[in-house]
């Protein structure tokens, strides 16, 4: 539907993985093989997650790291993550997708930047393909270890040739630029304090050459300002611009500490940003003024961030968090539930360069949608505004969640064949990574 269009008591018809048509209660419905009666329930486009590190659910709420700053948190966990392999990456991706689906998320990106072994993104795509989840893999990278003045240990960084050739291999093998794609690939050096300047430049060139998107962390932490000034002699955003990243191809995670002028420049350049509310609050940094960025014309999407910083992967909760943060910052009229929903759908779709097909339910869009639970105790009494009721009175979860027209959640139950078998394997892999067995 056009942005903001709402139909009270209407219907939506799906065909061949697409939205076929929509109508009001007085318009006749097309013939259908299957009808789901969503009476009394809110239907929205599937939420889109544009920043995550799925592997981190193997070290959720890891006690030795939980009360540190961002940099302390990272340096405690990097050595644990050095144990990642294909099996644990597959399992963590599977679990992450299951969580995301229950929270109404139908497309996710994943910023996978720790590569102690090869082919980890292949393992991720195996999981998302088995599930039937729409996925944008982000080939992350780190090149600057402690020995080179960076933050991560040598065991989790790679040389530039390895990164670039693997990036190219993943694009050629998995990136599907065609309409309705289930898998796309973006390139995503981790952050300026863990990669070299040359890999930033080379990655931007490779993305241009293959017409794929670019992603990185930017202006996430105050420590980053002093690091950038000391190492690069520039502020983070100046550096970002100098290495060729200020293009509409780029979306950046967090983007908290840009100056007003820098915000204007990046907005004008077509860069978009992802806000990760729970992560911002748990790591206790600041948070971006999403409404100010949006008013400059910068799309702002929503991400759950890694499961070891936000410790969950719940897009409904992050959407609510975005609304609460905006209101806490700027007052009760700062953000409505509809605006937060717009961030998690249209804003996030813009992050991924996928606005033509996802984040809305116009005829022709991908048939990715959520029929939300409504009969929960917590929503009883929310009678006057179904969208505000949905975001204020949760917890909300998907009653039916469809990706490409396929119900992956049905009547509140995940329909993932392998989940029962995956969960104990994930628990064992997590215990091993945390040194508990
Ligand atoms: Zn992150």
Image: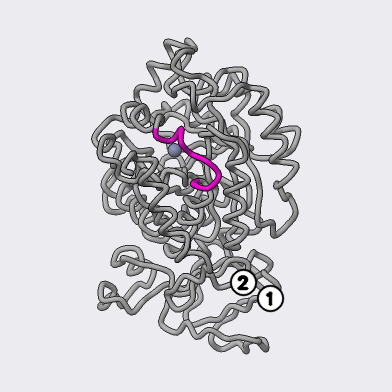
Q: Nearer the viewer, residue 217 or 353?
A: 217
At x 74% / y 37%, what residue is drawn?
210
Element type at mark 2: loop
List the residue tagged with mark 2: 405
The residue positioned 52% from the left and 63% from the top of the image is: 46
The percent coordinates of residue 361 (x first, y second) are 59, 67
Residue 140 is left or right of residue 172, and the answer is: left
Quarter of the rendered structure image containing ligand 1: top left
| Mark 2 / mark 1, whichever is N-terminal | 1
User: What span is in magenta?
Assistant: 80-88
The residue that mark 1 highlights is: 15
| Residue 85 lies in the magenta-colored region | yes
**In terms of secondary structure, where does tag 1 sit?**
strand
Tell me the CA gap for discs 2 and 1.
7 Å
Q: Residue furthest front?
A: 437
Vertical placement of residue 328 versus 209, above or below = below
Residue 24 position within the rendered picture, expressed as x and y whole percent measured from the top left: 55, 82
Q: Residue at x 47, y 73 (%)?
A: 371
Residue 28 percent across, percent down from the top left = 62, 89
């Amino acid at each position: 539907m056009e942005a903001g269009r709402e139909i009270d008591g209407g219907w939506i018809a799906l065909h061949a993985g697409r939205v076929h048509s929509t109508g009001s209660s007085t318009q006749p419905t097309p013939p259908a093989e299957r009808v789901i009666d969503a009476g009394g329930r809110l239907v929205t486009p599937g939420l889109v997650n544009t920043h995550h590190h799925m592997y981190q659910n193997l070290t959720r709420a890891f006690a030795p790291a939980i009360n540190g700053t961002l940099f302390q948190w990272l340096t405690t966990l990097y050595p644990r993550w050095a144990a990642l392999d294909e099996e644990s990456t597959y399992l963590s991706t599977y679990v992450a997708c299951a969580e995301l689906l229950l929270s109404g998320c139908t497309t996710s990106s994943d910023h996978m930047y720790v590569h102690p072994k090869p082919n980890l993104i292949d393992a991720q795509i195996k999981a998302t393909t088995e599930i039937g989840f729409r996925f944008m893999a982000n080939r992350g990278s780190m090149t600057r270890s402690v020995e080179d003045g960076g933050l991560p240990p040598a065991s989790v960084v790679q040389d530039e040739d390895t990164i670039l050739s693997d990036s190219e291999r993943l694009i050629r093998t998995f990136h599907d630029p065609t309409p309705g794609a289930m898998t796309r690939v973006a390139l995503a050096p981790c952050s300026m304090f863990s990669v070299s300047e040359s890999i930033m430049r080379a990655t931007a060139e490779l993305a241009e050459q293959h017409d794929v998107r670019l992603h990185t962390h930017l202006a996430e932490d105050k420590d980053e300002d002093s690091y950038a000034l000391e190492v690069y002699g520039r502020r983070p955003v100046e550096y970002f611009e100098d290495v060729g990243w200020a293009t509409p191809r780029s979306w950046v995670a967090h983007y908290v500490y840009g100056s007003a002028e820098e915000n204007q420049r990046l907005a004008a350049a077509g860069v978009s940003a992802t806000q990760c509310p729970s992560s911002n609050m748990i790591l206790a940094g600041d948070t971006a003024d999403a409404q100010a960025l949006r008013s400059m014309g910068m799309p702002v999407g929503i991400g759950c961030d890694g499961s070891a910083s936000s410790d969950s992967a719940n897009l409904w909760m992050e959407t609510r968090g975005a609304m609460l943060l905006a209101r806490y910052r700027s007052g009760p009229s700062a953000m409505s539930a509809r605006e937060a929903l717009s961030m998690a759908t249209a804003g996030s779709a813009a992050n991924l360069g996928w606005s033509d097909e996802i984040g809305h339910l116009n005829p022709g869009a991908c048939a990715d949608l959520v029929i939300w639970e409504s009969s929960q105790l917590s929503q009883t009494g929310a009678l006057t505004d179904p969208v505000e009721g949905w975001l204020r009175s949760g917890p909300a979860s998907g009653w039916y969640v469809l990706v490409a027209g396929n119900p992956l959640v049905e009547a509140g139950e995940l329909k993932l064949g392998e989940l029962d078998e995956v969960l104990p394997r994930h628990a064992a892999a997590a215990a091993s990574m945390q040194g508990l067995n």
